[in-house]
Image (cartoon, rainbow, N blue to C red):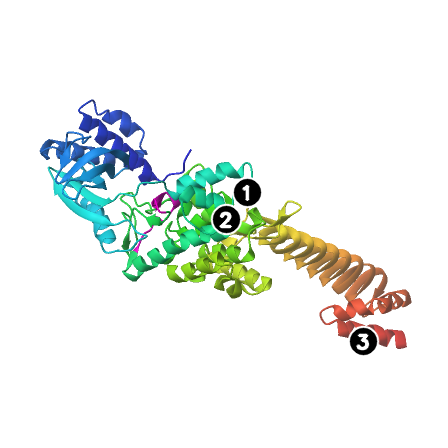
Amino acid sequence: MEAQSVDDLLDRLVAEYSDRVARGGPAGEAEILARAPEAHREALQRCFRMIQAGVATAPRAGAPLGPGVRLDRFEIVRELGRGGMAIVYLANQLELRRPVALKVLRPGLALERRNVDRFRREALAIARLQHPHIVQVHAVGEADGWHFLAMEYVEGRTLADVYAELAELAKLARPTGEDLERLTGFRAGGAKLERALCAFLAPVARALGVAHELGLVHRDVKPSNILIHADGRAVIADFGLAKGDGDPGLSLSGEPLGTPYYMSPEQATLIAEPVDRRTDVYSLGVTLFEGLTGRRPYEGDTVLQVLERLRSSEPPSARSLVPTLSTGVDAVVRRAMAKSPSERYPTALELAVDLQAISEGHPPQALAREGSAWKRVGRVYVGVFQLRREYRSARTFLGWPLVHLVPSVAGKNKVAKGWFAYGPQAIGFVALGGVVRGVFAFGALAAGLFAFGGLSLGVFALGGLAVGLLSFGGVSAGQTAIGGLAVGHYAIGGRAHAIHAIDAERHDPEAIEWFTRLEPVLDALPAGEVLVRRVEELRGR
């Protein structure tokens, strides 16, 4: 099932009710209400009453629009599609004899001011954006009770359609730049898919940059909102969610506006950051990721699953899914899709520059910015604590992620498992945290080949209470024990209980000989030089 938010469901139910009323048949209000979440039924019922009132008072709003019907100076040809807010028709603008996409607000919704405001906001937003890669507005108005928006008609497919065909091709062979050219009509010179796709999306990034300069954020950038002109040009559509830079952008139900698959963490209200132009950078990064890999970074059957994965894990590396991708395009995707807005491209125009660089075979700035692998790991490590999120690396070895970090806020039952693991509970080759197990284990309770902690169990154990083949601690027990209180076969400490012991009362010769052999090990321990001097003094007597 396609993931969708509560608002998506409510929009569909309102649309279905509106259509039934407009056709004049039984509205089936009770049946539709039963399909809505109980908490939203009262608000939905109020909306239904407004639709009924709107149909009753609008001069013609109760009669469905169809082929041949005139609305102001437009004559409808056929329906193109419909959503929760509006129906889109192909229409002819009579005086200019040109086709237009006529977007008409559904009957009854116009009675609620916020619906009209949102509808008109789309018109005003697009009208300000005179750009060849943004759908143009021709007219906006009201006639016979219908609110409408006449837009440029782009006859062709969407990028989502192209991605679907590329996915089919991928079942047989890796798609190429020539495949993208054939499906879009865009000329990229027969380059590899990554170069062709970056060349195709670079103008989209520049168009978003122009919108951002005017203070507008799209908020719903995704493949289905990128139309493809007959000349192969990509055109951004549906600025219906557009708002001023920094506006919260919540819907009536309190849900974030946008599409979960392409939604930024701040847009999904997962992190306390303003929703600004960088949210479009993120969504375009997801769009690029999908085109390169054939899948979206976060999948799920419901919106809650998608948002939980967005909250709890880092997106997989594009290159980990498609190893033939260049490190350059992987770096561009990674920077565009960074969880923290401060780590992303600050503007869409800067993203456009890197996309253009990839398309021309040049290294992007994102690659130079990333620096060494250790620097990248450091940024991720800091991000775990700043954003309080889980991180699991996409790359694995023998079934384990290379890195798995779980912050303490994730809860004590969440276990970090990886070659490098950190968390309240951690299991790994190197494990750090509260309760840990690993070859190298560092924690409050640590068990491993080399264990370091408050309570440590291991072949080599160091801690407040240490138990191991070789143990060192406040209280130490093992074959060889060193500590304030040491218990073992060989023991040295403030007080030692062993077959061969060194303490204030006993200076066993065999123990002295044994610890003499262990001087290199003793020297590496905390305050080890004191132990070495003590053994040397005893041996010299």
Q: Viewer-nearest of labels 3 and 1?
A: 1
* Residue at image mark 1: 174
Location of residue 277 by image quarter: bottom left
Give the Cα separation between the discs numbered 3 and 1. Answer: 68 Å
Contact flag, marks 3 and 1 (Cβ < 8 Å): no
Residue 153: x %, y % from top left:
26, 43
Q: Residue furthest top?
A: 26
* Residue at image mark 3: 533
- Horizontal arrangement in the rendering, residue 175 relative to residue 497 (left or right): left
Does residue 509 sit above or below 416 in this rendering? Answer: below
Name the residue located 17 percent from the left edge and 46 percent from the top edge.
140
Locate the C terminus and report the quarter of the image it occupies.
bottom right
Judged from the image, the secondary structure of the residue bearing numbered disc 1 is loop
Residue 193, label in figure: 2
Judged from the image, the secondary structure of the residue bearing numbered disc 2 is helix
First in sequence, mark 2 or 3: give its number: 2
Of residues 470 and 511, the one nearer the viewer is 470
- Horizontal arrangement in the rendering, residue 517 relative to residue 274 (left or right): right
